[in-house]
Amino acid sequence: MSEADPFNARKLAALREEILTQGLVADRFLANDADCPAFGLNLACAWPFPDALRAAYEQMAGRLAACSPGLYVYPFAFTHLTLVTLISFSRHVRPSAELVKALTGKADEIIVALAPLFAENSTERIKSFTLQPQSPVPSRSAVILPLVNPDGEVARLRQRMGELLRHHASLHRELVERGLNVPGIIHSTVARFAQTPADLNKFLSAFDKVAADTKFPAIQADELLLTSETKPYMRGGEILHRFKLAAG
């Protein structure tokens, strides 16, 4: 999917057809142990979303929750945008203290590897950028907000990050083994299914009404965050490092 046009009419129709023919999927963590200990590392921003989005988000969240009792809608405090998954929490559930210490130590190596993107004297330094949230979209496993990045900074950031990490071969190999993932779109997940709706058509009809009424102001990203993830879906974790962006 193109980052410039994340969900055109054709792609939305394909997602809807997939839902209608294959059904929705309950999330394995939320359905069984939402607060299980885990460990991941992410490059993220807007954790949580800026306060300018709070009113619109909480209105949407309340209406989405009413669409199905089994829909887990992210509280505003847990909203975030993952730009790159460096270490996937889903591969490190109930990790030992020794493993958590070892994986946390990778943060320093990542900071060094990505220095050209954020150092004040670097010609490659990333500038602050704009993200425009779109209306929520359902997929089989989640509800997401696609975001448009008009000037393409996120695509360039992701591409250059991959190049820099590959220059650090041993670090790159380990991150790949531990779930390194660069999404093909810019999006924020805002809901998942702890239980699937009993009446799919009724759910989709209610969802469509919420989506049609939901509008958000733009997000200005002035910093990126290297975060740990100690419970699924950023329900726990901390900011390990703040990367300040150059003025746009």
Image (cartoon, rainbow, N blue to C red):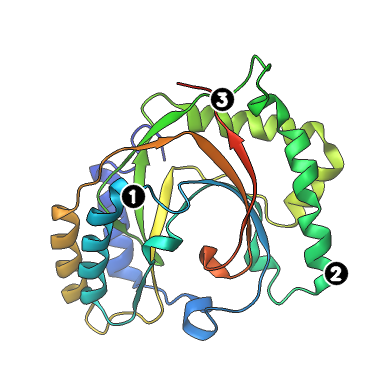
Above or below for 5 versus 247:
below
Location of residue 109 in the rendering, given as x and y in whole percent from the top left corner: 80, 42
Which is in the foreground here, disc 1 or disc 3? 1
Above or below for 16 versus 170:
below
Mark drawn on residue 98 = 2
Q: Nearer the viewer, residue 224 or 142?
A: 224
Location of residue 239 in the rendering, given as x and y in whole percent from the top left corner: 61, 52
Of pointers 1 and 3, the one earlier in the residue sequence: 1
Image quadrant where one finds the N terminus: top left
Q: Secondary structure at mark 2?
A: helix
Binning the other alpha carbons within 10 Å of mark 2 as few (below 14), some (14 to 19) or many (20 upward) gives few
Q: Residue furthest front?
A: 51
Can the viewer see residue 172?
A: no
Location of residue 32 in the rendering, given as x and y in whole percent from the top left corner: 52, 85
Q: Nearer the viewer, residue 128 or 154?
A: 128
Q: CA distance from mark 2 to mark 1?
A: 37 Å
Which is in the foreground here, disc 2 or disc 1? 1
Above or below for 35 versus 21:
below
What residue is shown with label 1? 51
Identify residue type, mark 2. Answer: Glu
The residue depicted at 41 percent of the width and 79 percent of the height is 194
The residue depicted at 72 percent of the width and 29 percent of the height is 115
Mark 3–mark 2 CB contact (< 8 Å): no
Above or below for 22 versus 166:
below
The residue depicted at 75 percent of the width and 73 percent of the height is 95
- Quadrant for residue 158, please give it: top right
Q: Secondary structure at mark 3?
A: loop
What residue is shown with label 3? 126
Identify residue type, mark 1. Answer: Asp
